[in-house]
Amino acid sequence: MTTLTAPPSRPADVPVPPAATVDPPATGLARAKEWVSDVAVLTYRNLVHVRREPAQLSDATIQPVLFTLLFVYIFGSAMAIAGGGSYKMFAIGGLVTMNLTTASMGTAVGMSSDVATGMMNRFRTLPMSRSAILAGRTISDLFAAALCGTIVLLTGLAIGWRPDHGIVGVVEGMAVALLFAYALSWFTACVGLLVGDPEAAQGVGMVILFPLAFLSTCFVPAAGLPAFPKVIAEWNPVSAVAGSCRELFGNPNPAALSDVWPAQHPVLMAVGSSLVILAICVPLASHLLRKATTD
Amino acid sequence: MTDRPMIEAEGLHKTYGETRAVDGVSLSVPRGSILGVLGPNGAGKTTTVRMLTTMTTPDAGTVHVAGIDVVADPRAARRRIGVTGQDATLDELLTGRQNLQMIGRLSRLSKPAAAARAEQLLDEFDLTYAADRQAKGYSGGMRRRLDLAASMVSRPEVLFLDEPTTGLDPTSRLRMWDVIRSLVAEGTTLLLTTQYLDEADELADAISVIDHGRVIAHGTARELKAMVGGEQLELTLSEPSGVAVGALSALVTSAITTSDDGRTLRAAVTPGAGKATAIIRALDDAGIAVDDVQFHHPSLDDVFFALTGSPAEAAAPTDPELLEVPR
């Protein structure tokens, strides 16, 4: 690029180099390289945000520790698990899932902040890829989710949780949970773009994600629930993610005793619903971003 | 060197719902010059800039920047332009340095080139001392400088500044003017919107006056002032007089405006030897006592008032009393 080789300070009277020579040919490969570079730059920028914004940092670090300790010691004290096993062993898979589900709200807040602060306007005047804005946001939130999930697991280990399937099982379980978190990120990106205001996005996200996380088998087995919530919990993809974690970690999974299809095939259900959410929300978020940045 | 203007807009229209924000604006800015776009709030300045800078698609009309059709190829246009909006668009959580580096990378500079350019701009805009502070701690003047620096990262040939000094204290404003002048000295073509008449007068090679989405006048500051005609006379009477206007009318070249308290009269006059004596004599003959007589060159305030019939907003230097007088 000519801009790179231009002298550091142009003396007066020397005209700007003619524009026509500046553009590299817009081949597919060049475009793809530019896209990857834009995504990397924006991912890094968003991660700097996570580190500097106390609320975001606490969501990814302190909140998972708190939730894990509170749920294990408060619920656990009054809980007997069907099919045996301690609540502690049962709970960690659910807590990973619940923390990642609620943490995906961060994407809604991040997207709407970029709209509200005018940063999106700055991006629009740059020769960058528009879709990199969404990719950079969801990827940085995936890193934050990985940190959040890891902290739940470390807290679990510290209080005596043990995965019977060892490190491989833990990695597999985390992979399923992170895929689901990534898909939810695209969903909340849509929420953020629709709402356009960080505080409202946080509110709307809460209203959707909290019931989703709690009407599941994250904290209690479905068997004990009243009829209607029981059906919801059994078919809720969040339950499938929690069940996948428990199975893959090698922890007690009472859902396996149920003959409902998602309970019998938690990994299939979790991965399948993640892909369905992505198939709907990736194009939808791109459309909403285009709409939010065109007038 | 081509003779084609660096910014060419023809017949721009933009309607939002029922509001015709821009209603047929045409502009042309030669390479290396500054066009001042002057108008009150809501005149259509910002919408015009948004159409010129790929942020809004015009309903009708064409825009070429550096010879590129902005509507057909916005991405190519974005490689040539720098834009600073009305509100500083900085990343609050990044440091000044990180902001500039990020913009550099997104403007297709390599990592080392973006880093070098950031250092250079921090130095040029006198922000090196604050380079490692988060932008949220910057003062108003620092934010504007960082914002302007951000729009200069890719050394754009064409720069758009939307009200670059609105809300700045006088010192920061003068400093910003110096920065803008040095940019143009380096060959950048610049379009600047402002609601400050003195700013357009000070910086712009040519001025387009916009009101209600239309260009209502275009020319150099001198040409625009000539439209108002001659010198401006300002008289202060000891007390209001019903016959003063009649006594003066033969000596002035425009309608006479009277302030609310009836003591200050304003009109255009053709300058000439003995003019002040003639005016005072005429008033004295009519039995009117005069406290003060002033002649001044027409300001852009006078121009704006003459063109639109309403005072320019936020035009601090002008006596508001005089501006409220209906013509």
Image (cartoon, rainbow, N blue to C red):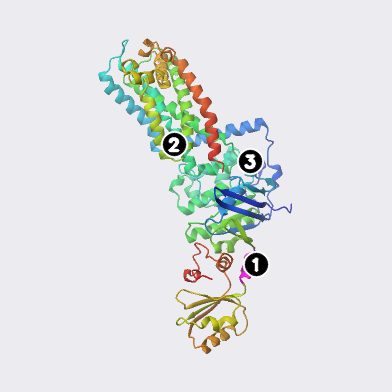
Q: What is the span of residues highlighted in magenta in the rendered image?
A: B219-228
Asked if residue A118 is positioned above or below residue B175 in the image, the reply reads above
Position of residue A212 in the picture relative to residue B60 (left or right): left
Tag 2 near tag 3, CB within 8 Å: no
Residue found at the far bottom of this picture: B285
> How many residues crowd around disc 2 within 10 Å: few (fewer than 14), some, or many (20 or more)?
many
Magenta highlight: main SS = helix
- Front in this rendered view, residue A164 or A13: A164
- Front in this rendered view, residue B228 or A3: B228
For residue A213, the mark is none
Can see residue A48?
Answer: no
The x and y percentages for residue B39 are: 56, 59
Amino acid found under the numbered disc labelled 3: Arg
Asked if residue B24 is positioned above or below residue A241 in the image, the reply reads below
CA–CA distance between discs 3 and 1? 37 Å
Amino acid found under the numbered disc labelled 2: Val
The x and y percentages for residue A156 are: 34, 21
Asked if residue A270 is positioned above or below residue B102 in the image, the reply reads above
Amino acid found under the numbered disc labelled 1: Glu
Q: Is residue A83 magenta?
A: no
Residue corresponding to mark 2: A109
Q: Residue at x 68, y 50 (%)?
A: A16
Position of residue B85 in the picture relative to residue A153 (left or right): right
Q: Residue at x 65, y 55 (%)?
A: B27
Q: Quadrant of the C terminus of chain A?
A: top right
Tag 3 near tag 1, CB within 8 Å: no
Residue corresponding to mark 1: B223
Residue found at the far right of this picture: B2
Q: Earlier in the sequence, mark 3 or mark 1?
A: 3
Badges 2 and 3, same chain: no
Disc 1 element: helix
- Front in this rendered view, residue B16 or A154: B16
